[in-house]
């Protein structure tokens, strides 16, 4: 196997199904050879701010992410060094004190709303995917998820969506579609696209192995 891992970027708006696509690809490989890195884990540490201040943060803006750290970690994994992946706490709106030890692997799946927005991250990727879904489907999924998993109320999700998530999606996320090699409609339900991706990744692994 040649030294550098393959990096697959899975972008898309909130509720698009990108996490499902990333996980479906992940499960097709042996856990020893693949790792999933979520851009959300690299939201900036805001532990120095009060909860009130953290609630004011725009989490859909490129500046909300610590892409410098994410890039540093991708480079480390690329040079076969381990990393300590941060863990994000959505209820406290900051990085938690835990970290997860990640060993270098042959395949890295990088998943997140704004991974295609930063050229430095794009340049690390071998395949760039954008998972697409209509806005009505995305807000419905977001409502269900944020209430059941992220401790939010209906009112807060709707308010955040209309005032921040939607305008930021249109300004920063949707335009990154142009950088995608493949746009996947109907995300996690799209078996054909997922199977095609898995086949393509296996081909790249085989090609690298004989280089
Ligand atoms: O998993 P998903 O891609 O939906 O995660 C990104 C979303 O998480 C962003 O749209 C952002 O609004 C939301 N977020 C949040 N509160 C935070 C951090 C992120 O609602 N503290």
Image (cartoon, grey):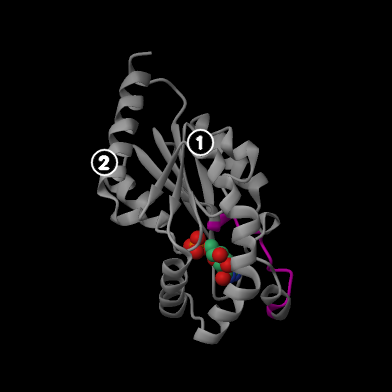
- Horizontal side of 90 relative to 29 (left or right) equals right
- Horizontal side of 91 relative to 144 (left or right) equals right
Question: Which label belongs to residue 32?
Answer: none
- Residue 98 image position (x, y, % from top left): 53, 62
Name the residue: 42% across, 54% down. 18
Tell me the CA gap for discs 2 and 1.
26 Å
| Secondary structure of residue under mark 1 | helix
* Residue 50 on the magenta segment: yes
Nearer the viewer's eye, disc 2 or disc 1? 2
- Residue 52 image position (x, y, % from top left): 71, 80
* Residue 172 on the magenta segment: no
Name the residue: 29% across, 37% down. 196
Name the residue: 25% across, 48% down. 191
Closest to the observer: 131 or 5? 131
Query: Is the CB of the residue bearing disc 1 within 8 angstroms of ligand 1?
Result: no
- Horizontal side of 69 relative to 144 (left or right) equals right
- Residue 172 image position (x, y, % from top left): 64, 54
Quarter of the image for residue 116 reads top right
The magenta-colored residue range is 40-51
Q: List the residue tagged with mark 2.
A: 195
Q: List the residue tagged with mark 1.
A: 77
- Ligand 1 is found in which quarter of the picture? bottom right
Residue 166 vertical position relative to residue 190 in the rendered view, above or below: below
């Amino acid at each position: 196997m040649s030294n550098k891992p393959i990096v697959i970027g899975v972008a898309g708006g909130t509720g698009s199904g990108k996490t499902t696509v990333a996980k479906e690809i992940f499960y097709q490989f042996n856990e020893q050879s693949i790792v999933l890195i979520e851009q959300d884990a690299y939201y900036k540490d805001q532990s120095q701010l009060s909860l009130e201040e953290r609630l004011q943060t725009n989490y859909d803006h490129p500046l909300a992410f610590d892409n410098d750290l994410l890039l540093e970690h991708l480079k480390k994994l690329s040079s076969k060094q381990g990393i300590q992946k941060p863990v994000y706490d959505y209820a406290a709106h900051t990085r938690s004190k835990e970290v997860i030890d990640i060993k270098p692997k042959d395949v890295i799946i990088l998943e997140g709303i704004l991974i295609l927005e930063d050229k430095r991250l794009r340049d690390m990727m071998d395949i760039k995917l954008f998972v697409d879904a209509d806005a009505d489907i995305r807000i419905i999924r977001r409502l269900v998820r944020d209430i059941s998993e992220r401790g939010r109320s209906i009112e807060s999700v709707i308010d955040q969506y209309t005032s921040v998530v939607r305008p930021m999606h249109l300004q920063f996320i949707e335009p990154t579609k142009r950088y995608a090699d493949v746009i996947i409609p109907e995300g996690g339900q799209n078996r054909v696209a997922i199977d095609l991706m898995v086949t393509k990744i296996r081909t790249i692994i085989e090609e690298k192995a004989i280089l």
